[in-house]
Amino acid sequence: MTKFLRKLAIYLLILFGFVVLVFPTLLLFPNQYAKLSHEMNMVYSINRLKHLNEPKMLIIGGSGCGFGIDSEKLFLHYNKPIVNTGTHAGLGLRLQIELFKEYIKEGDVVIVIPEYQQYKDNLFYGESTTLRILSSTYTEGFKFLSLFQWIYLFKFIPQTFMDALISKDMKYVENTLYSKEALNQFGDVTMYYQRISKKKVTLDEKVFNKKVDIEAIELLVDFDNYVRQKKATMILFPPAYQASSFHQNNQFIEALQQQLSEAGCPFRACPSRYALPDSLFFDTPYHLSAVGTQERTCLLIEDIDQNLSKK
Amino acid sequence: MLFNSLEFALFLPLVFLLYWFVFNKNLMFQNIFLLVVSCFFYAYWDWRFLFLLTISIILIYYPAKFMIAADSSKKKRFWLWIGIVFSVGFLGIFKYYDFFVNSFSDLLLEFGFKANIPSLNIILPVGISFYTFHGLSYIIDLYKGKIEEEKSFVHYALFVSFFPLLVAGPIERATHLLPQINKPRTFDYHKAVDGLRQILWGLFKKIVIADNCAVYVNQVFDSYQDQSGSTLLLAAVLFAIQIYGDFSGYSDIALGSARLLGIELLRNFNFPYFSRDIAEFWRRWHISLTTWFRDYIYIPLGGSRVSKAKVIRNTFIIFLVSGFWHGANWTFVVWGAFHALLFLPLIVLDKNRKNTNTVAEGRVLPSVKEFGQMVLTFGLVVIGWVFFRADTITEAFDYLASIMSLDIISVPWLKNRVYYIPLVLSVFMMFAFEWIQRTQQFGLATLFANNSMLRRILYLVLGVVIYFYFCYHNESNSFIYFQF
């Protein structure tokens, strides 16, 4: 028995060691899709922020921000540079906050609009999207991952690698609705405005059958305090969300709203205000059509004005 | 919990350690421990299933007890049939009630009558077909005097619910497993290592082969109307590989897990895709089920010792029942009937026991004839699998008809071709290893036995690849045979 356990332990140790050493090297394989698509917005945003010294409006969120805000309208209204960092919810809320924190300066207005899934699990800590975008477009970003995130993301390495292998043939993304050419100077994805999506918008069916992740709320509270210390302003908004999905997940959203309020970092607008008719959405429950984008941006301006005037 | 899950990876070592280090001093304690963990294993799916398992155990154990206590053969037969009828009825309600209700309603509708027969909409308990058959084998063998009555309820309950075979077999026999339960087990290093080896091989077949085939198979079957003949053919072949990897992989994990605990289970697969005819295929595929049907239905009906017409009748009955056992859908019945039709010429020509030895015995490669026979048998089996996989009979026929189109001679659709290179290599490796080991119990049994370094490297590579694909698939692909 001792011999059996000893040999088994040695085998598992060698296996474990091999996996820990070899798997990260798989991230060296570049993902063509990340380099050609709107996912480049993350590194474009960072580059813009590096060179912006004046007070700005910084939008942090998932692709619902990239595919649903008319930043030019905001620019004309507020006469401030707008940086829309909304790239992909899969980056994880935690990393998104960490990535852009250092660029916050006095006088900035930071609009945080996470998608509802970003308050827990994969879209909070990150997933293969995180690894894909970081390894292919911004390797410096790895330093922002905590040790727990490294352990959490480890299991996504195989998927990231396989996606990279598959992406070799992804030249088709060039000059399409999701390509980097679709981005405007603010970080909005706009090329699709003239198009009608061929995809039916899928319903988020009861995805939120779990409780709100406390860590997500703590992160936002800490970020709010950080932004205040920088003499900037943070405003947390609910995302624009397809109405039918909103109704499906009402319980979770209500619980989230309550917990944020109790933590002292409430939504600065009612979530139901941003539960927009299904017809205003383009291809996902968070991506708005051209008309939807305008409507949402108007709501956003009203709510930002209201919040800024209170301060 | 699934065998290819993190939970099982934690469960099995814990059971192993407690079994050999804490509960090994006393056989009854050890068996009680195994029964408790088996119940936990089953309840992990759904705690309500435990009630059904308990009922199933009681429905055989007590009639069996009364049968033994009965003082006349008439009363013995009575209790035997009580046990059989109640157990099969129990299985029938959970597995077939809604099917019969819906089929009957559909039939009435064909004649213009609308029937509002309520269906039960009950979930099918995982493994119910398997553990019901365990119990039936006990009471029938007891009646025939092949075994002694199992006086311990714990031992009998363990026989029915032993966790490695609880949800997907192999279907054990009381004559084989009960004596092992009643006997003290001692740890055997070589058996334990062999068990681990078999688990590794099973995980490879399930996670690397079956789950990767499933990606393509599901995409094609879900949109078969839009696919070319060559694509449909490829998907059908991959489904044949998927179901083999899935089921035999699962059986390997079951056998390996049991061997770690010092218990030998019945072999369930003997490299069926190396069969030279359909009869040989059925001697090598899901062996525990086919032998169960042979011993408890075919032979009591007269088996092969009756007229040719009755042999044919008995064969058809077995295949139809076997098809029906697999699922409450007419597609499974048609699948069974298809195999019965394939079997028919072999019976008529008395060639059903022709290929009983190992193919290419003593040789490295098969002869051209043998290779041709294997390819033909595999092809016929693939056709049958289309019925097994399809949702309806119409869909299956549509699918097969679509294969036979001009675009069968075209390059199959393969989105992201590079994804399939590892799969092709893995499938090739699986068949190569199993071919080399075709006289052994499983594909890794004695492979590279004379070269320990090569063997260790192979185990390491398999471990890495298994872990890679386990992470990649992330969500466990549920085992095909679970709802049987």
Image (cartoon, rainbow, N blue to C red):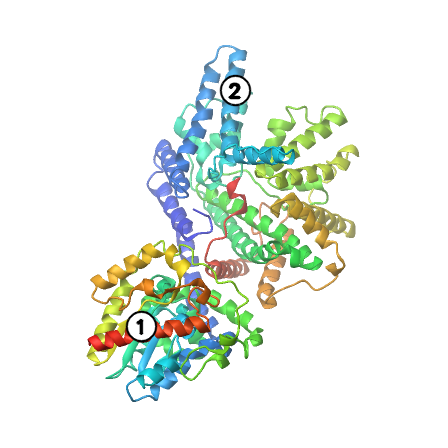
Element assignment for label 1: strand
From the viewer's perspective, is residue B36 above or below residue A215?
A: above
Q: Nearer the viewer, mark 2 or mark 1?
A: 1
Which chain is mark 1 on? A
Name the secondary structure under disc 2.
Answer: helix
Question: How crowded is the residue under tag 1: few (<14 C-alpha within 10 Å), some, or many (20+)?
Answer: many
The residue tagged 1 is: A112
Q: Is residue B48 left or right of residue B227?
A: left
In percent of width and height, residue B416 lies at 59, 67
Q: Quadrant of the C terminus of chain A?
A: bottom left
The residue beneath circle 2 is B80
Query: From what the image shows, is residue A182 above or below residue B55?
Result: below
- Foreground pick, A304 / B184: A304
Q: Amino acid at mark 2?
A: Leu
Amino acid at the residue labelled 1: Val
Q: Position of residue B448 (x, y in %)?
A: 58, 56
Tell me whether marks 2 and 1 sit on the same chain: no
Q: Is residue B172 visible?
A: no
**Residue A78, located in which quarter of the rendered image?**
bottom left
Q: CA distance from mark 2 to mark 1?
A: 71 Å
- The residue at the point 41 percent across, 43 percent down is B45
Task: Estimate the x, y position of residue B344 in percent, counting from the top left.
Answer: 75, 35
